[in-house]
Amino acid sequence: MKKFGFILLVIMFLVYGYQGYEVVRKYKQDDIKVKTSGRLSDIVGKVASVPLETPDNGVVRQVRRVQTDGNHLFLISDLRLLQFDLSGKFVRQLTPSVSDGEVFFADYALDADHHLLIAIDSQRNICKFDYAGNLLSKTTLKQPWRKLTAFTYHNGYFWMSAEYLVKNADNPDSYQIVHSLFQFDADMNEIAGQRLHIADVGRFKIFESYFVDELLADEYGVYAYTSPNDMEHLLIDTLHIMHHEELPFMYKDGFFGAACIYPVRKGKRFQIATNYQSINDNYTFCFDRIDHTAYILQKGFKDNLQKTGYIADLQSIDIYNNSYCYIKSGASLSKKFPDRAKSNNNPVLFIVTLKG
């Protein structure tokens, strides 16, 4: 048995070594340009500015999960689920219910087909709202998950990634954390689930991280995205992924029933990864498939369109990664929004459409 395991390990090293060689050869033949600085206009075709009105119960900060549908704009700020219109006017805060006390919404998804918002609170209740803020229904997830990590709506279904504990096969007295992708129907009935694995990037990996930042989609289906701690291998990993696009990905046709976690947000033209969670590992990575240019940036893209300095964190607001956003406040707004530059409590949200 040990001999078989050793032979299998050798075969895996040879396969990954050959794949790595093929990608490096393609890298050289395609004459990839690597840039350590870049302007926002290099990747962006259009920018819309949304000066956000201050809500009734506190300022807007720590913005995440920005989504739009028509004139409706939603975002999470300091554990509050807020609704604006696209002029920046504050509309309302969506809440689970008055009786829930400290319960807050952890994530949400927009069902643009029916103009509904479905939010998950910190007690794993699923609340369905219309865009007028009316609570239409409330149900509770019964799945024995340890932690829900991401949530989205795509192609008529809701998708969630979650961690749960399973007994360790080698040591029944211990447990391991497993991360999986789940599919739900419109009534939040579970349809299917697949275990998440790191996508094949052509490198042999013994240890894998299953943390998920977002659930996104491409022409093959739904996949998970996580930002790597560093960008040391992002270019070669991205080239490998694109080089093997003609092959079925695990999350579509299934490889031992596995779904995939990718190190980049995959777009039609641009492959983007950002990490601004820690001081030492900040980066913006972007690969342009048409110009064959890789941007490997420590400070982010220079905003030569709105003159707000450097963009530290591009957040995707489109499941197919065609649109992104960034938020600025204070002195960085002095050129275009001088009236808002005096305070960090009056941010402007910028929505960008990437070049096609």
Image: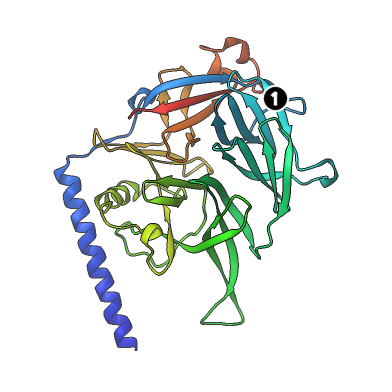
Image check: 141 left or right of 254? right
Residue 19 can be seen in this image = yes
Tell me if residue 175 comes above or below residue 156 in the rendering.
below
Q: Nearer the viewer, residue 124 or 155?
A: 155
Tell me if residue 318 comes above or below residue 28 in the rendering.
above
Give the residue type at disc 1: Val
In the image, farthest residue toward the left: 29
Q: Where is residue 305 shown, x and y percent of the image?
A: 42, 18
Image check: 254 left or right of 275? left
Residue in the image at 55% along x and 82% along y: 171
Residue in the image at 34% along x and 38% along y: 268
Residue 4, quarter of picture:
bottom left
Residue in the image at 54% along x and 46% along y: 152
Q: Where is residue 309 shown, x and y percent of the image?
A: 47, 22
Tell me if residue 11 comes above or below residue 116 in the rendering.
below
Q: How was this image coloured?
A: rainbow
Q: How many marks?
A: 1
Residue 297, quarter of picture:
top left
Residue in the image at 74% along x and 39% along y: 135
Per the image, the residue denoted by label 1 is 91
Q: Where is residue 80 shown, x and y percent of the image?
A: 70, 37
Q: Where is residue 213 shown, x and y percent of the image?
A: 52, 48
Q: Nearer the viewer, residue 30 or 312?
A: 30
Image check: 28 left or right of 254? left
Image check: 181 left or right of 88? left
Residue 78 can be seen in this image = no
